[in-house]
Image (cartoon, grey):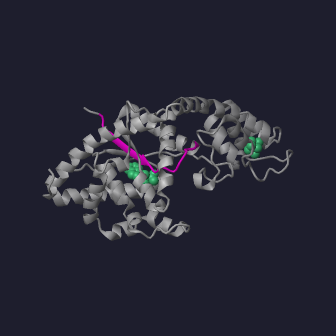
Amino acid sequence: MPPGRVLSGMRPTGRLHLGHLQGVLSNWLKLQDEYECFFFVADWHALTTDYAAPFQISGNITQMVLDWLSVGIDPRKSTVFRQSEVKEHAELFVLLSMITPIPWLERNPTYKELLQEIKDKDIHTYGFLGYPVLQTADIIIYKAEKVPVGIDQAPHLELSREIARRFNHLYGEVFPEPQTLMTAVPKVLGIDGRKMSKSYNNAVLLSDAPDVVEKKLLGMMTDTARKRRSDAGNPDVCPFFVTFHVLYSDEGTIEQVREGCAKASIGCTDCKRMVIPRVLASLEPIRKRRAELEKDPSVVESILKDGRRRASGVAVGTMIEVRKAMGLSGC
Ligand code: TRP
Ligand code: SF4
């Protein structure tokens, strides 16, 4: 039995942070040893919201791929490519858009939420409404069986299954229905105590220098009720604890911190210093690999070129089947 095929993508938002590592990338790393994986840069999807600044996107692509490689995404095992370099995604998107009812897209909760939330850009566009249709094309063009995504993407995947089903019903069985591999995303909070996110400017980046990481962690928000050193604190509501101790400390340290915090026998700085070396040590190999990769600026380019070749091999074959099923030219 050949292993199933896994596909996932990320919009190129720039340098990645610890939230991406703990949530998405650690999962990709496991999957690349078990399945045939395709990981791609969703640069067309980035345009759905950032169409007014397309040139910024290309710089972000290199930085994001460097982060993928630095954490251990291995182009010998996985196909790493850029969406806009495999034009067949766009052809399938056009065809799927013929069969996707508008109400399916309008009731998508992510769509409704973002229309409310995003005020600094005009996203009342055809492309933004069609975001999940393009995402469906990305997935089914590789006949991917499994798509690892976070819970926020679940409605999109449900739509992808519906669109694939509709295609099969109208034109014959071409596509397997993609299954969601739900990624359990651990709680990763940023230095201001909110969810770690690039847009909040509160993130610890994978490529931050050790002294920057240390400074960010020492400045990170703690239990706000613990105002003085002599006040007792509650680790369970402390953003620093629930992120860094929970993810990086051993049981013994966690116990020590719980007791010390509750009895006010340790201060927040002592508490932070108990885990900072571990965080730095875990980032060290990532930083080293990145420094190595940065020496040769053509590395990312040649990996994407090879990825494009491998991805196209599959996508071109699927499109021949699709055109045949729909009686179009080019099969
Ligand atoms: N929508 C995804 C995100 O924002 C990115 C994405 C685009 C994707 N196409 C995909 C993810 C296909 C999985 C499969 O994270
Ligand atoms: Fe948080 Fe540690 Fe300070 Fe307690 S002692 S509030 S767990 S940083």
Image: 48 above or below 77: below
Which residue corresponds to the image point at 42% horizontal and 56% vertical from the top-left?
45
Q: Quadrant of the N terminus?
A: top left
Does 264 lie within the magenta span? no
| Left or right: where 288 falls relative to 225 | left
Q: Quadrant of residue 210?
A: top right
Relative image position of residue 217 (x, y in whole percent) = 71, 42
Between 313 and 250, the residue placed more toward the observer is: 313
Number of marks in the rendered image:
0
Q: Main secondary structure of the magenta part?
A: loop
Which residue corresponds to the image point at 21% horizontal and 50% vertical from the top-left?
319
Between 59 and 21, the residue placed more toward the observer is: 59
Does 14 lie within the magenta span? yes
Which residue corresponds to the image point at 81% horizontal and 46% vertical from the top-left?
232
Relative image position of residue 261 (x, y in whole percent) = 77, 41
Which residue corresponds to the image point at 50% horizontal and 38% vertical from the top-left?
66
Relative image position of residue 240 (x, y in whole percent) = 69, 44
Residue 153 in view in this figure: no
| Left or right: where 34 falls relative to 326 | right
Residue 121 in view in this figure: yes
Span of residues in magenta: 3-17
Q: Quadrant of residue 104?
A: bottom left
Relative image position of residue 330 (x, y in whole percent) = 15, 52
